[in-house]
Image: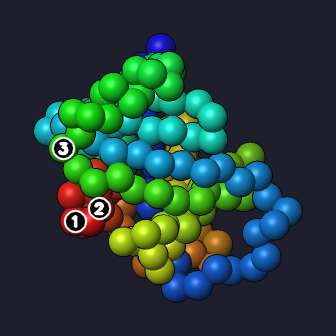
C-alpha cells in the first residue's frame, strides 16, 4: 500500500499529436464508490486497485491498494458514478518525466487529456509543457475524473 503525495498537472488536447502505436498502452476502466472523499476503483489491464485521494488540485495525498478481481467487482456494485473507460498511452518526456495521454471512450468519446506526475511541487511549477499540450485544466474541477464520472 502506498501513501505518497500525488503531484500532477493536467492538460486538454485538441487532437492526437502523433502516431501512438510505439508507446506503452493501458486499458483502464474506473468508477467511484465515493466522491467526497474520493474513493476510486480502477482496473488497469489485468490489475485492480482501490484508491483514496485527499483534497487538492496540483498536490494531494493518495493511497493506492491492489485488490483482487473479486473485490473489485463486489465493490463496483456500490459505485456512486458511471464507469469511465479510456486508453492510456505512456509517452516519455525530457527530464525523465512521462506524459499519460488518455483517450476517453463511450459517453466521453472525443475527450483527450494528458497528465504529467512530478516528484516535487517545484518541478511541477517549473515544467514547460511541450507544444502539443493544449489548455491546462489542473485547477478546473470539471476535468477531474471523479467529476467526469458523475457527468456521464
**Residue sitting at 39 percent across and 56 percent down?**
84
Q: Nearer the viewer, residue 113 or 40?
A: 40
Tags 2 and 1 touching, CB below 8 Å: yes
Seen in the picture, residue 137 relative to 23 is either above or below; the reply is below
Q: Is residue 107 left or right of residue 2?
A: left
Seen in the picture, residue 22 relative to 112 is either above or below; the reply is above
Q: The residue tagged with tag 2: helix, strand or loop?
A: helix
Residue bearing the label numbered 1: 151
Can residue 2 be seen here? The reply is: no
**Residue sitting at 53 percent across and 49 percent down?**
28
Residue bearing the label numbered 3: 80
Query: Which dot marks residue 148?
Result: 2
Can residue 14 be seen here? The reply is: yes
> x, y (%) of residue 134?
50, 79
**Residue sitting at 23 percent across and 39 percent down?**
79
**How far apart in space, not on screen, are marks 3 and 2 (Cα)?**
12 Å
> x, y (%) of residue 24?
76, 52
Seen in the picture, residue 54 relative to 134 is either above or below; the reply is above
Amino acid at each position: 500500500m502506498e501513501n505518497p503525495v500525488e503531484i500532477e498537472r493536467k492538460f486538454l488536447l485538441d487532437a492526437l499529436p502523433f502516431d501512438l502505436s510505439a508507446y506503452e498502452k493501458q486499458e483502464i476502466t474506473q468508477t467511484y464508490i465515493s466522491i467526497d472523499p474520493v474513493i476510486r476503483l480502477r482496473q488497469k489491464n489485468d490489475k485492480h486497485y482501490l484508491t483514496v485521494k485527499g483534497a487538492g488540485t496540483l498536490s494531494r495525498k493518495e493511497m493506492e491498494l491492489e485488490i483482487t478481481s473479486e473485490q473489485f467487482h463486489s465493490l463496483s456494485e456500490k459505485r456512486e458514478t458511471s464507469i469511465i473507460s479510456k486508453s492510456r498511452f505512456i509517452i516519455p518526456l525530457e527530464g525523465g518525466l512521462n506524459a499519460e495521454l488518455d483517450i476517453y471512450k463511450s459517453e466521453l468519446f472525443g475527450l483527450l487529456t494528458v497528465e504529467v506526475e512530478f516528484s516535487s511541487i517545484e518541478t511541477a511549477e517549473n515544467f514547460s509543457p511541450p507544444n502539443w499540450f493544449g489548455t491546462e485544466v489542473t485547477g478546473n474541477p470539471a476535468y477531474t475524473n471523479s467529476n467526469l464520472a458523475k457527468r456521464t
